[in-house]
Amino acid sequence: MSNCNILIVEDERLVALSIREILQSEGYTVCGIARSTKNAMEVLAGCSPNLALMDIKIKGNPDGIDLAIKLRTEFGIPSVFLTAYSDNSLLDRAKSAEPLGYILKPFKQSDILSAVKIALHKSAEEKKRDQKSREMEKTVEAHTEKLGKEVATREMAERELQQKSDHLQDANKALTSLLEARDAEKRALEESILVNIKKYVVPYVEMIKSQTSDTGVLETVNFLEDALQKAVSPASKTLFAKYLDLTPQESRIADLIRQGKKTKDIADILNLAPSSISTHRYSIRRKLGLLNSSTNLETFLNADNGES
């Protein structure tokens, strides 16, 4: 018990000395005896007690209850009250100091030793609970901090993934638009070639055939005509027939209509105003003889073209 230092605060000298003798006989160390609040604070300057035996009615102001409160709140030192008073009002006030026990005067040696033993045990248990509580708080704080970092990392990863997804979608849209535009240009070029063949090659082939009876020439012309027919696929020949009178721009728009594109889509692909597309649609219907017809333009352009 020699490692348990006890402070005695008792204004009756003989009582204080008697208590010290009892404690020392059991191996406790009495690190100081104080007779007043002021004296107790002076003793504490060179003393680190584990427990204070505190007379409630010590001389001076504040009294033992106020001193016990100060010792607990400022120094973490618990108290056991010594008192000759047992009235309820005083004991109710003493509760605010959270004492670890009471010793009523006059006391016996066994009263002192039992109260001190129980108080020290309670104090040790309180310190263990406080230590566990602090450790638990630190553990919770560490886990909370770790969880916060994990959540922040996950949120950042999700944001980066979303940004990549957005960039990919934008790139996909741009690529789709580019491919559609290139496809439209390709078809327009093919249609332009077909129109030029129809306008500038076929008439001369037919003229040569009608103006000569030379077998060799006719054989060459027939060979040329057959080559032209093979160069023009069935679908292209259908387009060729339908697009004959269309301008290159109208041919592009007609092909996009045939693919199911709407006015706004075509405007976006060709970088034209929707009103311009509507004007071209009107011109196409006029050239195809559909102005006074309820025939759907897309359906008409796909008819007999190998497409549903």
Image: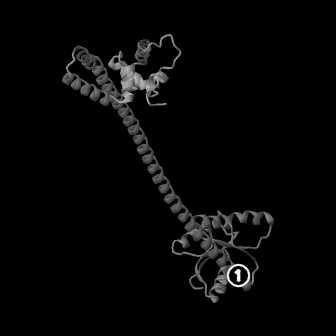
Q: In terms of depth relative to the viewer, which is nearer, 31 or 278? A: 278
Q: Is 180 situated above or below 202?
A: below
Q: Position of residue 26 (x, y in %)?
A: 64, 88
* Whether residue 31 can be seen here: yes
Q: Which class describes the residues within 10 Å of circle 1: few (<14), some (14-19), or many (20+)?
A: some
131 relative position to 211: left or right: right
Q: Is 96 situated above or below 279?
A: below
Q: Quadrant of residue 203?
A: top left
98 relative position to 211: left or right: right
Residue shown at 21%/25% (left/top)? 220
Under mark 1, the amino acid is: Ile
Residue shown at 57%/70% (left/top)? 131
190 relative position to 133: left or right: left
Residue most extreme to the top: 292
Q: Which residue is mark 1?
A: 112
Q: Position of residue 205 (x, y in %)?
A: 25, 19
Q: Is 258 situated above or below 135?
A: above
Q: In terms of depth relative to the viewer, which is nearer, 16 or 46? A: 46
Q: In which quadrant is the N terminus drawn?
A: bottom right
Q: In terms of depth relative to the viewer, which is nearer, 253 or 121? A: 253
Q: Quadrant of residue 95?
A: bottom right
Q: In terms of depth relative to the viewer, which is nearer, 166 or 265? A: 265
Specify how the rendered protein is coloured: one colour
* Whether residue 52 can be seen here: no
173 relative position to 51: left or right: left
Residue most extreme to the right: 87
Q: Position of residue 169 (x, y in %)?
A: 42, 40
Q: Secondary structure at mark 1?
A: helix
Q: Quadrant of residue 63?
A: bottom right
